[in-house]
Amino acid sequence: MNEEDRPLRKGWTTGTCATAATKAAFTALLTGAFPDPVEVTLPGGQRPAFALATTAADAEQATAGVVKDAGDDPDVTHGALILATVRRGRPGAGVMFRAGAGVGTVTRAGLPLPPGEPAINPVPRRMMAEALVEVARAHGVPCDVEVEIGVAKGKALAAKTLNGRLGIVGGLSILGTTGIVVPYSCAAWIHSIHRGVDVARAAGLDHIAASTGSASEQLVQELYGLPETALIDMGDFVGGTLKYVKTHPVPQVTIAGGVAKMTKLAQGLLDLHSKRGAVDLETLAAFSQAAGGSDDLPARIQGANTAAEAFGLAADEGVPLGDEVARAAQQTALKVVAGKPVAVEVVVFDRQGQLVGRAPFAHAGPPR
């Protein structure tokens, strides 16, 4: 089997790794011995086992570490050491979570956790609590436990994520809903998009801008003077962004991107990754004709190597190809948010940072 043909390998979320480390540490605190490997139960009922990468214990606390394996997913936390330190808590206090080194703290409203809480999401918390209860019952002790979760070099890794923009400071988030990382699902990115929308709504913003990359994001921020909390780094996931906005409405949404990505959206694609579809030069040629181009412009555009070259050919004739692309892209977007009080605008930038296309804010159907 060729490397390209082999099935993509699934991995484990930071929440699953934290749960395994927590269970092992609590067991050692009670018995003096670390189970290795340690088995945990996932939300779907699966029971994977994990080897321990590091252990330490004394009379007051026990620490265990598990190295995260993200499978074939391009995850920034792949290979990270997830650490859990468990201490006995106050009688009757139940399970308490603390942010250790490399795990962030929530500072803004709109996230699944209130400001001041460690950035350990609800599902991983539940998984850890259930694992702790399992161990406590097995040894006939109350489950009054303090759990400190850390990630080695987590603060540096967090700089490669969107945590800072979301108001999560000091490190990474402990994430996961199923416990399993599906390759190329880019679940962490989608999670960041959702939380970004939540933070913007909680801040009372009525206008957000979702951009395909850092260049278009900077340009749209300059265009409107938007605060950082209004900026959503959606990457290729325009469909996922709009679907979330449909269920969590924001009055005005600007979609911003370069000529190639916005052409794909104009073609009706909601996933703009190169693996999901290419720029259709025939469609661009038709747009150029609708925009008033010369009789031979469509043929020259169809012979272009890239969308950028096609836009250059149109610009040489003064043809507003970008506006046609923006309008078609807007129609694709409006179909997703139809029926909701969401106005969508599309802006298109070229590689030189010039605004080359715009479809002003509009709703799907009659204005509201």
Image (cartoon, helix red, strand yellow):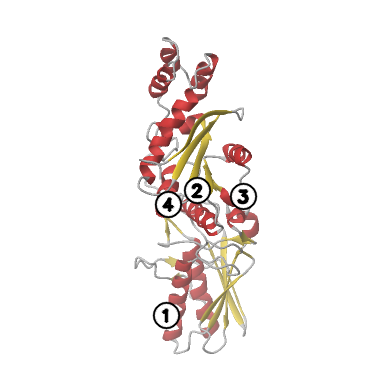
For marks 3 and 4 on the same chain, the one whose residue lies earlier in the sequence: 3
**What residue is pinned by disc 3?**
228
Which residue is rendered at x = 49% and y = 26% of the image? 322
Residue 11 in percent (x, y) is at 44, 56
Question: In the figure, is residue 194 to the left or right of 87?
Answer: left
Residue 279: give its label: none
- For the N terminus, give its image quadrant: top left
Whole-number angstrom distance, CA of label 1 to CA of label 2: 33 Å
Residue 167 in percent (x, y) is at 60, 59
Q: What secondary structure is marked by label 1?
A: helix
Whole-number angstrom distance, CA of label 2 to CA of label 3: 26 Å
**What residue is pinned by disc 4?**
244
Residue 80 in percent (x, y) is at 57, 58
Residue 259 in percent (x, y) is at 50, 29
For marks 3 and 1 on the same chain, the one whose residue lies earlier in the sequence: 1
For marks 2 and 3 on the same chain, the one whose residue lies earlier in the sequence: 2
Whole-number angstrom distance, CA of label 4 to CA of label 2: 23 Å
Q: What secondary structure is marked by label 4?
A: helix
For marks 4 and 1 on the same chain, the one whose residue lies earlier in the sequence: 1
Q: Nearer the viewer, residue 125 or 258?
A: 258
Numbered disc in front, either 4 or 2: 4
